[in-house]
Amino acid sequence: MVILELSESQKHGLIFGGAIIIAGLVLATVVFPFWNLIREDVFEEVEILSNKDGVCYVATQDNVPKTIENCNAQVGDTVTIKFGRDLAWAEIVTP
């Protein structure tokens, strides 16, 4: 049976590496949770304010103007859009 002996520097390196990994996990889950990167989808009924060459612009309740690409709607049409909270782009969806 072979037993692996670690030197003092290897033991200290292993402890230091473990501490770094634990600190990274704590930071990732407590300080900056990854779910903050996943934005909530918002659905809103809006009026098309302008359509310039297939790119529509609308105003939403979050006060962030939205851009909708490949838009066939006309100015004044009411459509339902889906967008991520506080993002500047949206897409038209069928209610």
Image (tube, rainbow, N blue to C red):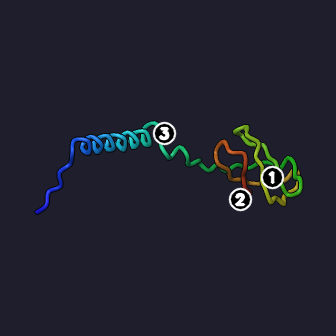
Left or right, residue 4 beside residue 43:
left
In the image, 27 versus 84, the foreground residue is 27
Residue drawn at 14 percent across, 57 percent down: 3
Distance between the Cα atoms at labels 3 and 1? 38 Å
Disc 3: which residue:
32
Q: Who comes first in sequence, dot 3 or dot 2?
A: 3
Disc 1: which residue:
78
Disc 2: which residue:
93
Mark 1 residue element: strand
Q: Measuring from the top left, give residue 13's x and y in whole percent.
A: 30, 43
Distance between the Cα atoms at labels 3 and 2? 32 Å
Q: Residue furthest bottom?
A: 1
Image quarter of the C terminus: bottom right
Name which residue type carries label 3.
Phe
Q: Measuring from the top left, give residue 75's x and y in whole percent.
A: 88, 51
Distance between the Cα atoms at labels 1 and 2? 12 Å
Mark 3 residue element: loop
Q: Measuring from the top left, give residue 70's x and y in whole percent.
A: 80, 60
Residue drawn at 83 percent across, 54 percent down: 55
Mark 2 residue element: strand
Q: Who comes first in sequence, dot 3 or dot 1?
A: 3
Residue drawn at 81 percent across, 58 percent down: 71
Q: Measuring from the top left, give residue 28's x and y in whole percent.
A: 44, 42
Residue drawn at 26 percent across, 40 percent down: 12
- Label disc, if present, on residue 18 of the rendered structure: none
Q: Residues within 10 Å of mark 2 (few under 14, many from 20)?
A: few
